[in-house]
Amino acid sequence: MMEQLKFRKFGRHAFLIDWKSKIDEIILDEILTVNNYISENFSEEIIETVSAYHSLAIYLKRDININSFIEKVKKSYTFMSKDMPAKKNYIITIPVCYEVEYAPDILSVASSHDHSIFEVIKLHTQTLYKVYFLGFLPGFPYLGGLDKRLYTPRKKKPRQNIVKGSIGIGGKQTGIYTVDSPGGWNIIGRSPLQFFNTAASQPTVINNGDYIKFVSISKKQYLKLDTSIKNGNYNIEKEAYND
Amino acid sequence: MIEVLSAGLYTTIQDIGRFGYRKYGVPLSGFMDSYSALLANQLVGNNYDCALMEITLSGPQLKFSSDTVIAITGAGFSPTLNNVEIPLNSLLKVNKNSVLKFGMASYGLLAYLSVSGGFNTEKILGSYSYYRDITSNSKIIKGDLLKISPTKRTYSISNVLVKTEKAHFNSRIIEVYKGCEFDLIRGGNKEELYDINFTISSESNRMAYLLKGNKKFSAKEIITAPVQPGTVQLTPSGQFIILMRDCQTTGGYARVFQLTDRAINRIAQKRGGESILFKLK
């Protein structure tokens, strides 16, 4: 796999490792494996890394010579690639209330596809979504796997504020507004979970490489969960994922 | 403690940034002009990463509840202490109950106020830098009481002014490296990019500076990929966007240039309407 990687400087204190320019779960697994390896073996030299669909950015400490560091990483790869352990991933269950009160656009999404609301919920909850990376907003997951029958163009006029926890569809993507934000996606539900918590050392619930499963809940269950979460009496449903 | 009597146009607390959380989609934030910010910290003997106040164009009025030592660097404000004009780029003693007023900047955009010991506002995810979704406040407002870390440092106050680089405010040259998608630029001879007078749009902010001036060049969108402060994006409609300290961690526009560190600091001080010229480093 290493032969295809492209190393490019990204300013003078960062570089990118780029894979083939496409969105693909196999590429993601490679990125996360390499990310893990670099993060663990070069913690002296690097500040942090950011991964995206087909690219890994490595931000270096200011006193590190970028050219010799890139060479060092390249060499170390060639020898080590076989031994790199894969990242451990989880399936995370996200309860979502799809009732109209929390889903202002579910009717229009349904009618634009000649679906019933129940079909929209069924199509949205039957997929195991892959988390490619976090970006756009703190904790916002870029998810792969939305059913083609739910592809819906973004709204012509974005909303000024979308309440955190809202689940949206924008074009070929579905995602979760993890914090309050303006946005143009069609809102089809809301989850009571806290997706981003600055008080925790690990501020996000969802991480790259994980899988997400949405589960439909009633408004009554939503309110009950919301109370439990606010009182700190809720543990997120999470199980290890084995290929 | 410092009491905010009036907040100014856009005043925040910043340090060197929120490192280590970009993988969660948390922006880096931090000093827009780290050249001026580091000087402010240096003058009062703070560590380079100490939190200080970043002041934009029209400054605040502040009241000090204890004796301290401060320095002001950056844009051309004419600050007064108890209505007496005080110099920039110098160490200043401030007595309890003094009132510091900034007024308007005559050149540049951002000033930095350092206080001996540094600001000790809430520290979230390893940083004091204000950011909308992270800290409880996104900017300073009237009535805020800002804590200062105590220090036992002693000072010998002299009237020495530190000389700053003139070009930092005067030069319109913005040095760049070619970006990852430089080759995606369409619309003409790329050499011309270094001859265009781009004007900074007044819609610019801590997230991004937008450039006006030329819509001849464009680039197609890319698969969303990492971006950082100083990344210059080019949209399919021909808009150049220079990402600044509060930018997102990833983006879907072609990354056509990357500013040098010095260029980021320099452009941070440009106002809407000022022009710049890219120069290949």
Image (cartoon, rainbow, N blue to C red):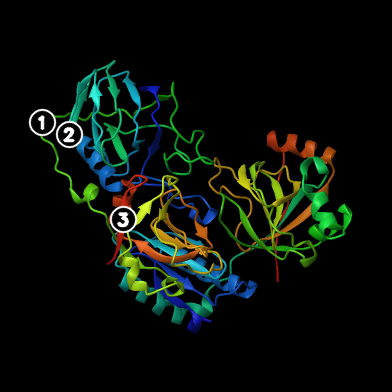
Disc assigned to residue B221 = none
Going by the numbered disc 3, the residue's amino acid type is: Ile
Nearer the N terminus, badge 3 or badge 2?
A: 2
Nearer the N terminus, badge 1 or badge 2?
A: 2
Q: Is residue A45 visible?
A: no
The percent coordinates of residue A70 (x first, y second) are 37, 73
Disc assigned to residue B90 = 2
Q: CA distance from mark 1 to mark 2?
A: 7 Å
Is label 1 on the same chain as label 2? yes
Q: Nearer the viewer, mark 3 or mark 2?
A: 3
Badge 3: chain ID:
B
The residue lying toward the viewer, choosing from B196 and B231, is: B196
Question: Which residue in the structure is indicated by mark 3?
Answer: B276
- Identify whether B169 is placed above or below B114: below
Label 2 element class = loop
Q: CA distance from mark 3 to mark 2?
A: 29 Å
Which image quarter: residue B6? top left
Q: Nearer the viewer, mark 1 or mark 3?
A: 3
Nearer the N terminus, badge 1 or badge 3?
A: 1
**Left or right: A161 as drawn, with respect to B31:** right
Question: Which residue in the structure is indicated by mark 1?
Answer: B159
How crowded is the residue under tag 2: few (<14 C-alpha within 10 Å), some, or many (20+)? many
Going by the numbered disc 1, the residue's amino acid type is: Asn
**Quadrant including the C terminus of chain A:** bottom right
**Left or right: B139 as drawn, with respect to B81:** right
- Identify whether B73 is placed above or below A17: above
**Left or right: B190 as drawn, with respect to B76:** right
- Identify whether B27 is placed above or below B63: below
Is label 3 on the same chain as label 2? yes
